[in-house]
């Protein structure tokens, strides 16, 4: 069944048909093939329709090798006789608005700047088009958006026309169709001529509005995010609700929100800086308290300790402070964070221990890795032993 054979008016909500066949696919999903259908299958950047067939829920529609498969939640007990198909109209009309809006916005970028659209995706909440350009400015985006909305406000007709390959040269197409038989054009006269099998309204006014949300660089092109029709109102409603919440939280009207947020962010940075300074002081006190736990051994004073759930950066600061106090200091600190064991070791100038060699012996025991030099080493691995066992292993390997 070709597109021309099954395609009906986009405004069709219910239709009568019969079931040709009912089968299961390779994954066990049930589907039916209809004599005629108004369900749109996934394709051309547009998602499939949903709806019902005699109260059997249609959850997916796909074209496979020219066959339109209507996937249903449960199979029919009897496939004989005529059945009624009903399209989920809210979903269908949303797709009509979005798809036609994409045609209009893509044509607006061509009209204003000769920026071609090279791909299109209609998502559940937003649409994207990829523009064949390395970058765009905000003024360009606003100009194309304004032109697109002007075309919508002018309530121009959206025509569909079936033509042959030989007739293609009669139309100024934005891009060449991917099919050669039963070519369906979607036309906004004097503005856009495009080969497309998707569903569209009869007038640009039914698109309602177009709003560009954002854009970013993507694989050497610009990926533009936008919404059309009722989705514009949904976005406005959601963002206005968030804005109302924020004005309440910040105790500031909308027009004063930016300076209030700037002040809060500056205050947060000051607090973070002060907190960092206090933490440095606390780590210094903690390191000083460890000096009294040193164990005098031949040629050095050993300090060893095991911790749980502490950033290794804190351990680094502690060992650095300790070895700066005394030249005979040898410090071994171990921490377990979730399923990871980490260690930091440092020494002053007098101990004869080579900490880099020590690490090379110990890291394989925990499937870990690390690095450093003779006077300092750090690294980590899996918790294949307890933190206390790792600490004693370090001591034994000295």
Image (cartoon, rainbow, N blue to C red):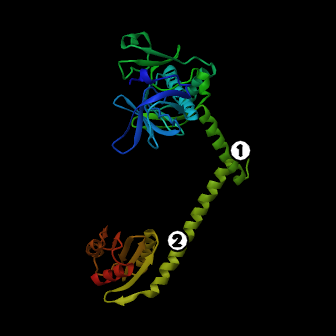
Camera-near label (1 vs 2) is 1
Label 1 sits on residue: 254
Q: Is disc 1 placed on a helix, strand or loop?
A: helix
Say if 59 sits above or below 176 in the image. Answer: below
Frontmost residue, 75 versus 352: 75
Nearer the observer, 223 or 6: 6
Provide residue 312's location: percent of width, then percent of height.
43, 70
Q: In this figure, which residue is indicated by the disc labeled 2?
A: 280
Please state, as top left, top right, bottom left or bottom right, where the N terminus lies in the image: top left
What whole-number distance in Å separates the C-alpha atoms at marks 1 and 2?
39 Å
**Looking at the picture, does residue 331 appear above or below residue 186?**
below
Residue visible at 39% across and 18% down?
A: 182
Name the one closer to the observer, 215 or 45: 45
Nearer to the camera, 70 or 388: 70
- Answer with the quarter of the image where residue 86 lies: top right
* Label 2 CA crowd tier, 10 Å (few <14, some 14–19, many 20+): some
Q: Which of the image's four quarters has the C terminus?
A: bottom left
Can you say whether 271 is above or below 288 in the image?
Answer: above
Mark earlier in primary sequence (1, 2): 1
Q: Quadrant of residue 228?
A: top right
Badge 1: few (under 14), some or many (20 or more) residues near its Cα, within 10 Å? few
The answer to whether residue 366 of the structure is visible from this angle is: yes
Indicate the position of residue 371 as horizontal and vertical percent values: 31, 67
Q: Residue at x 65, y 51 (%)?
A: 261
Residue 175 placed where, x, y %? 41, 21
Residue at the image point whose x is 64% and y is 36% from the top: 233
Q: Going 45% across and 75% down the picture, which residue do you hit?
A: 308
In the rendering, at what x and y percent does residue 386 appear? 37, 78
């Amino acid at each position: 069944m070709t597109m021309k054979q099954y395609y009906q008016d986009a405004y069709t909500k219910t239709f009568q048909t019969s079931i040709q066949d009912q089968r299961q696919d390779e994954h066990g999903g049930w589907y039916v093939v209809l004599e005629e259908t108004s369900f749109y299958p996934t394709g051309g950047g547009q998602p499939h329709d949903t709806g019902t067939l005699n109260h059997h829920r249609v959850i997916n529609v796909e074209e496979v090798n020219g066959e339109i498969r209507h996937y249903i939640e449960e199979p029919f007990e009897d496939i004989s006789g005529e059945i009624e198909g009903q399209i989920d109209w809210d979903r269908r009309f949303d797709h009509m608005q979005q798809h036609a809006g994409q045609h209009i916005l893509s044509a607006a970028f061509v009209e204003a700047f000769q920026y071609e659209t090279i791909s299109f995706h209609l998502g559940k909440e937003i649409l994207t088009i990829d523009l064949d350009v390395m970058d765009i400015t905000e003024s360009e985006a606003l100009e194309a958006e304004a032109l697109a909305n002007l075309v919508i406000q002018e309530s121009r007709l959206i025509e569909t026309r079936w033509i042959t390959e030989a007739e293609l040269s009669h139309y100024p197409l934005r891009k060449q169709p991917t099919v050669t038989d039963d070519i369906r054009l979607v036309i906004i006269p004097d503005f856009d001529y495009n080969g497309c099998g998707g569903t569209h309204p009869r007038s640009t006014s039914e698109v309602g509005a177009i709003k560009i949300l954002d854009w970013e660089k993507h694989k050497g092109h610009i990926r533009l995010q936008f919404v059309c029709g009722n989705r514009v109102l949904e976005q406005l409603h959601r963002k206005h609700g968030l804005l109302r919440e924020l004005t309440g939280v910040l105790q500031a009207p909308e027009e004063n929100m930016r300076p209030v947020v700037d002040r809060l962010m500056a205050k947060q940075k000051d607090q973070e800086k002060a907190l960092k300074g206090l933490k440095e002081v606390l780590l210094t006190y903690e390191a000083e308290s460890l000096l009294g736990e040193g164990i005098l051994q031949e040629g050095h004073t050993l300090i060893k300790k095991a911790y749980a759930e502490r950033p290794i950066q804190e351990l680094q600061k502690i060992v650095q402070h300790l070895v700066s106090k005394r030249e005979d200091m040898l410090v071994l600190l171990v921490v377990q964070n979730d399923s990871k064991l980490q260690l930091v070791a440092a020494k002053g100038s007098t101990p004869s221990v080579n900490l880099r060699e020590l690490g090379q012996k110990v890291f394989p025991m925990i499937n870990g890795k690390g690095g450093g030099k003779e006077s300092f080493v750090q690294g980590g691995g899996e918790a294949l032993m307890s933190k206390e066992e790792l600490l004693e292993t370090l001591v034994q390997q000295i």
